[in-house]
Amino acid sequence: MPGDVQLRALTKQYDETLAVDAIDASINAGEFFSLLGPSGCGKTTTLRMIAGFVRPTSGEILLDGVDVAQVPPHNRNVHTVFQNYALFPHLNVFDNIAFGLRRQKVGKAEVRRRVEESLELVELGGMGARRPQQLSGGQQQRVALARALVLRPAVLLLDEPLGALDAKIRKQLRLELKALQEEVGITFVFVTHDQEEALSMSDRVAVMSKGRIEQIGTPAEVYESPATVFVADFLGVSNLMDAEAIPEPEHADDRCTVAVGDFRLRAAAGDVAASGPVKVVARPERVELLEHGAERANCLPGMVERTVYVGASVQVMVRLATGAQLQASIANTGHADGYQQGTPVCVHIPEDALRILGDSGAAPPPAPAPAPEIAGASA
Amino acid sequence: MSTTVATPEAPPRDSAPAPVTQKRSLVPKFLRNPWGQPRFLVAITWTYIAWALVPVLIAILFSFNAGKSRSVWQGFSIRWWWGDPTQSIFHDPEYTQALVHSLLLAGLDMLIATPLGVLLAIGLSRWRGRGSGVSNSLMLIPLVTPEIVMAVSLLVVFTQLAIFPFSAIHLGTTAQVIGQVTFSLSYVVVIIRSRLVSIGPQYEEAARDLGATSWGAIRLVLLPLLMPAILASMLIVFALSIDDFVVTQYMSSTASTTTIPMYLYSNARGGTSTPALNALATILVSTTLLAIAIGYLVYSVLGRRTASSRGGASALRELSGMEA
């Protein structure tokens, strides 16, 4: 099946700034692949290089094994759904969708058949005579999809296609888009800054920061096993804490002791072979709150600082005795009102929920810890 | 406001608040009301409009005078327009000649300056790099150059310079058209460029993404989207040309290259002119107004239909800014 994309040392340098810094990625045919990152991380530039609007400074873009890095956009079998759809306002829906087919000199009857077919695909049958301006945002988005899909591209590029829609339609279109992708079986490369969007639709996600790919993996992998501090921090609230790793030689393979302030905890996830200063992370939904004074392993004393009611859950901010702040997300079972401000609690982090992040060179935005190699050597 | 209400620090809780007492003022009450209509402003505005328009309306009115006078009303007639077999504007060869020549120049200017200006604007909008910023600002200079300076410079260049392209240009219709194109081109470039900015690069990119070549994207997407602005520029160029006096005058040669404004200039003070002169002026005013009105309508109606949501309203503003 066509639609396999390989990026090799792909780089884009604008005058002073390195927008995309020698990234490598391999996107499988038929895969829903997301480029996720904050604005300015290079995800859109990467997409525009695959589309052909931006010429790479160096590197290769292999589309089914052929390097297309220097091929102009109109000669690539790759089509784009633009952020604001870019539907031609002077043409009606039918002519918008037929635009690409007519450029390929497809016969009149065939154009009609394929346009009708793709209108049906996106559930807009009979809307061909409308002008784009007469459609709702969600409908425009579907026309943009139909316009690209009618050309049967090997790869469909989507540049934040849900960004312009309001929250409710967005959630609904997420499901539809994923279902559509499964139906047509085309490789989708999806750019977004919305982690929920990326996690809920993708087969695999590439998390980008400052022109580099931090981690590529399935949604579960990048969320549950973030490889770097950046990934942990960007994908949801991550409760990052500074800690000191103390290796346990007899359990070197599966766990390690970390010192958080004066407290010792067991951590069984992440870089358990680390030693010296590290960052540890625990997802709020894995953090448990116990009564003050509970005698359990992996517990830290703290005090409730603030409670935020968000409906399905209650977010409890706890100030730990070590001075760090930790967020716990407690499912709303109707009894979550016990966490008043100032309540002393015991924060329990199961050892498999406490992940050690080896410093992989990508310094996190807050002040970086002293160089780990030197500290480790002196210990 | 100067009131004598209790200070906010110590509001008397038990008694009702004291009524707001207003100082007596010489300004009438309806002008003091901050929520009222801005009547004073309205009055000034209408005074100005009357001041500017009444003389023109009087001139137009006198083109329908029954007598020969251009200052004493002697009854209504259309003799200076059509009725008089020798002296009405459509029977006197001097008048008809000026009218025809004005329309000819306006037509040529429109057909030459608009396509050139569109191409120039498209070119400038995609030129990035050294010199592009400077050239973009330099394009605006013809808009602010005193017309007389441009006219005299062109005259010198066309009559004194013996270097090829200039030596081939002789005063008369050719020089008049070139002179008018020279200054009207900037207007076209400014209108088209502002439209290009509001269209943005995304439609062209979409066209190229769907398989159109660069030229195909311009022809199939960009030009249709620019069409309201192109039509509006054509009509504005037409109005500019019909109205122009200075450049057209300097570039003229014989009596056959006289235009309406030139004719009006040389005859307005003479005692021999008839109300037919007023009729000619009326034609000048109405063609200009008509061209601008059509341009405005085309731009707003077509613009609204073809533009993206943000295009329409701002495009209108750009155009009204242009005419000022």
Image: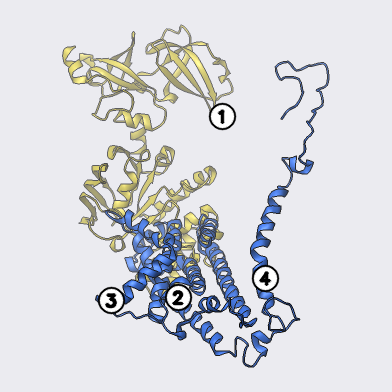
Q: Check disc 1 and report its element: helix, strand or loop.
A: loop
The way the protein has been coloured in the rendering is by chain
* CA separation in Å, label 4 and label 3: 45 Å
Q: Residue at left 68%, top 84%?
A: B68
Q: Which mark is residue B249?
A: 2
Residue A286, image x and y in percent? 42, 23
Task: Identify the image quadrant of residue A239.
Answer: top left
Q: Residue at left 43%, top 38%?
A: A196
Residue at mark 1: A311
Task: Identify the image quadrant of residue A255.
Answer: top left
Q: Which chain is home to disc 4? A: B
What amino acid type is highlighted by mark number 4? Leu
Residue at mark 4: B57
Residue at mark 3: B165
- Position of B168 with respect to B321 (left or right) is left
* CA separation in Å, label 3 and label 1: 79 Å
Kindly indicate which chain is depicted in yellow in the rendered structure. Answer: A
Q: Which of the two discs, 2 and 4, sits closer to the camera? A: 2
- Position of A44 with respect to A59 (left or right) is right
What amino acid type is highlighted by mark number 3? Pro
Q: Which of the two discs, 1 and 4, sits closer to the camera? A: 4
Q: In the orientation shown, which residue stands out farthest toward the bottom?
A: B85
Residue A93, image x and y in percent? 49, 64
* CA separation in Å, label 2 and label 1: 79 Å
Same chain assignment for discs 3 and 2: yes
Badge 1 crowding class, 10 Å Cα cut-off, few under 14, some 14 to 19, many 20 or more, is: few
Q: Check disc 4 and report its element: helix, strand or loop.
A: helix
Tell me the colour chain B is drawn in: blue
Residue A82, image x and y in percent? 41, 53
Residue A126 position (above or below residue A213)? below
What amino acid type is highlighted by mark number 1? Gly
